[in-house]
Amino acid sequence: MEANCLAPSLGRYEFVLRRLHSLTGLMPIGGYLAFHLLTNASIIDGVEVYQRRADQIHELGVTTVVLLLEWPIIFIPILFHGILGIVIVSRGKRNVADYPFIGNIRYTLQRWTGVIAFLFIIWHVFHMHGWFKASWWVENVVRPLGGGRFDPHNAYTAAQAIQESVWVQAMFFVGVLASVYHFANGLWTMGITWGVWTSPRAQRWANVPCAAVGVFLACAGVAALIGMLVADKPGAGQVPPVQTQDSRIPTPTASVPSPVEFANPARIEVSRFPSSPPQRAGRTT
C-alpha cells in the first residue's frame, strides 16, 4: 500500500484548511521572514547597529513581545502551517523521477524545502530562545541542551552562537535558503490558488516578481550569516547599556540652594538692620 493512502484525510474542511494554509504562508509567516532576515542583515553595519535593532523590538516589553506578538502572530501560524504542510506532503505522490519537468521539480522542492524549513525553525527558536521563558524550563532543559543562546541585551550573543560550530553555520545556510525558496515559490503557487494568475502567460510573467523576491531575501539571509561570522565582540563602551524601566526613573536628590537663593530680598532686608547700632563718630570742633 502506498504511503499517501495511509496519510490522514483533511475531511470536509480540506478546502478551508488549504486556503488558510496558503494565506498564513504569506502573512504573517512570509512577512515575518522578510522582517527577520533584514533585521539580522543589519549586523553588516556593525554590532552596534544590530544591537539598536534588537533594542527597538524588545523595548516593547515581555508581555507585548511574547504574549501579543510571538505566539499569536508568529509561532502559532508557523505551527499550523508546518504541521498541515507535513500532512499535505505525506499525501502527495513523488513522481519526479518519472516526470522530470521543471514544474514537477519545483513542486517537489516546494514540499521538501517546507519540511526542512519547518524543522530548521523549530531548532532555531530553541537554539536562540529556548521556546519558553519559564525559569524552571530554561534552567533544567534549555541550558543543559545548549539552547537559549540569544540575549537581547547583548545581541552579539547571536553571532557567538553561530561562530561556535561549522555544523551550526551549515544548518543556518541550508535552513535560510530553504525558507526563502519555500516562500518565494509559494508566492507563485499562492497566486494560482487564489486566482491571481490563472492563464499560462500570466503564470510565466508571475515568475519574475516571485524570483526577484526570492533573490532579494536570499541575499539578505546570506549577508546576515556572513555578518554573524565576521562580527567582532564589541569593546567596552561601544554598545550603549540598555536602559531598564527603573533606570529611566530619575533618582530624587537633595536640592542644594543656589547663590541666587541666598541673595533673596528677605535676607537682604534683614541685613540692613544690624543687631547693634553703629557707634557715632565724635564731633569735631
Image (cartoon, rainbow, N blue to C red):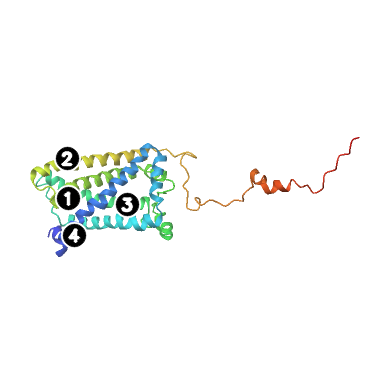
Q: Residue at x 30, y 46 (%)?
A: 35
Q: Quadrant of residue 144?
A: bottom left
In the depicted view, which residue is nearer to us: 95 or 152? Answer: 152
Q: Amino acid at mark 2?
A: Val
CA separation, marks 4 and 2? 28 Å
* Callout 4–callout 3 Cβ contact below 8 Å: no
Report helix, strand or loop for mark 3. helix
Q: Circle 1 is placed at which residue position?
A: 190
Task: Nearest to the eye among marks 3 and 1: give it.
Answer: 1
* Callout 2–callout 3 Cβ contact below 8 Å: no
Q: Amino acid at mark 4?
A: Leu
**Residue 208's mark?**
2
Q: Amino acid at mark 1?
A: Met
Report helix, strand or loop for mark 2. helix
Nearer the N terminus, badge 3 or badge 1? Answer: 3
Q: Please state if 213 lies on the left or on the right of 133 as rendered.
A: left
Report helix, strand or loop for mark 4. helix
In the depicted view, which residue is nearer to us: 256 or 162? Answer: 256
